[in-house]
Structure formats: C-alpha cells, structure tokens
Amino acid sequence: TMATPSRSLTIVITGASRGLGAGMTRTYLERGHKVAACSRSPPAADLDSSSADKGGRLYYQSNVDVCDPQAVQGFLENAAKNLGSDIDVWINNAGILGPIKPIRDTNFADFEKNIEINLMGVFHGTKAYINHCRSRANVAAEPSTLVNISSGAAVKGYAGWGAYCSSKGGVDRLTESALMEEQDDSTNSKLCFRAYSIAPGVIDTDMQTMIRSTDKKDFPMVDKFHEIKTNDSFNTPPYIAIEIEKLALLEGPQTLPVVQRIASEKE
C-alpha cells in the first residue's frame, strides 16, 4: 500500500464500468478521494452508487455516452454539484480497440465508431473540463489536471490496428494542443492547468482478452500478447491510478512532457 495522499482530490473517470476505469475508481475511493464515474454500460456491482454507501458525498456515478457532448457537459455539472466541489482531475479513459483488421478490409462505419469514441469522446471531455477549470473560483491555488488515457499505439502504427493507432495518435496531439493553449493564455494567466496523455502499458482487462482472441491474419503481433499473459507482465489499475495521482498532486505549472509512458510495474 502506498502512503496516504497529501490531499484529497475530486476526480472524474469516464469508461469506469470495467477494466482500468473501474480499477482506478476503486483505488481512488480507497485512498479517500471523491470520485465521479461514468460509463455507457452499468457499473460493477460494488461501484453502483445505489447499492453501497460510499461515505456520503464521496461518490457519484452516472450513465453517459461520451460521444454526446451535451451528456458529457451535463455529467460534469452533476458531478461537481453532487460531490460539492470543483473537479481537480478529469480522466478521459473511455475507449475501444476495434476494429482489428487490415485497412483494406475495414468497414467504414466501424472505423468511424472508433474515432467517434476514442478521439471525439476525448475532445468533448477535454473541452468541457477546460471550460470548468477556467471558471474555478481560485484557479491559481488549485491546480487542475487533465489526463487522457492513450497508448503506445499512439506513437507508431501496428498492422491491424489502423483505427486505434489513428485515434490514440490524435489524442496525444489534442492533449499537447490543449496544454499550449491554456498555458499561454493571456486572458487567464493565473490558471494552473496541466494536461497529460498517458500510455498505461498492458493491463489484464477484457480488452486484452479480445486482443488475444484475434486472428493472426488480422493482427500479426498477436503472439506477443499471448506472451505477456503467459509471463504475467501486466501493469495493474491501482499502480496506474497512483502514478496519475502523483502527477495530479504536483504543485504549480506543468514541467513534465504531455505524452507520458508509464514504466512497467515489474521494472
């Protein structure tokens, strides 16, 4: 177990019903942070806000489609209201991997859906959160941290992953652009806004199960992912959550690069 965090944060996590999102939500609640979580599908039983008392006003959970900008904006407002505080950390985690196919065989609508969720969804969350940060009462004293969950697939192509590589590459560039805009903005020079696009490494989730079940002709590198499973060389959600927490608890303006690759837990 890690040392108790130096202060309690109010954290939003999208795509929180399973995998990394659910794991980070549990970790942050255990560590005394306030969390607002959303997802398209119903949450895990222990993260259903109606089934468990999360210590009063410490947890808010909602059904949200990140592709709908009005829904994202409404979720932000409800989260702040229900948790009784401004949002310190916004984690755009919702994402899909597929279609896994050579581009020549990829269905247009499937490719478009990937971009819609992985890139447009992150855009909607990023825009809503930046405007929230800019309206905070004490923007200088309260750092605001945007975290977009990216991938190693953002920095280079993989055969069969054309859609995922494209959308995650877009996420890295979007995040860099957002930071430049808010850091250099003379109209709001007191704003303490930080933005990171984080590649969390390989985590043992449903997404990995899906990768391992892929046909080699659609994804030539599939064997590498079987190897990761065999060797259990995964990163875990609590580890990723705490790495993000460390970034969020840093004081003052951002000095680290936007695009961050989380080192392997086993290293």
Image (cartoon, helix red, strand yellow):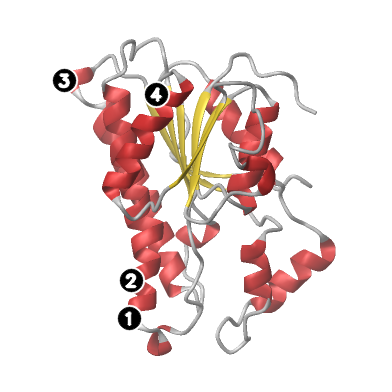
Left or right, 131 with respect to 253, comes to left
Mark 3 is on which residue type? Answer: Thr
**Pair 3/2: label in front:** 2
Q: Secondary structure at mark 4?
A: helix
In the rendered image, residue 38, in percent from the top left (x then y), is placed at 48, 44
Q: Relative to 164, is 88 above or below?
A: above
The earlier-in-sequence mark between 1 and 3 is 1
The residue labelled by disc 3 is 187
Left or right, 220 with respect to 191, comes to right
Mark 1 is on which residue type? Answer: Phe
Mark 4 is on which residue type? Answer: Lys
Q: CA distance from mark 2 to mark 1?
A: 6 Å
Say if residue 87 shows up in the picture: no
Q: Are marks 2 and 1 in contact (CB under 8 Å)?
A: yes
The earlier-in-sequence mark between 3 and 4 is 4
Q: Secondary structure at mark 2?
A: helix
> Mark number for residue 81?
4
Residue lying at 30% horizontally and 32% vertically, measured from the top left: 130
> Mark number for residue 108?
1
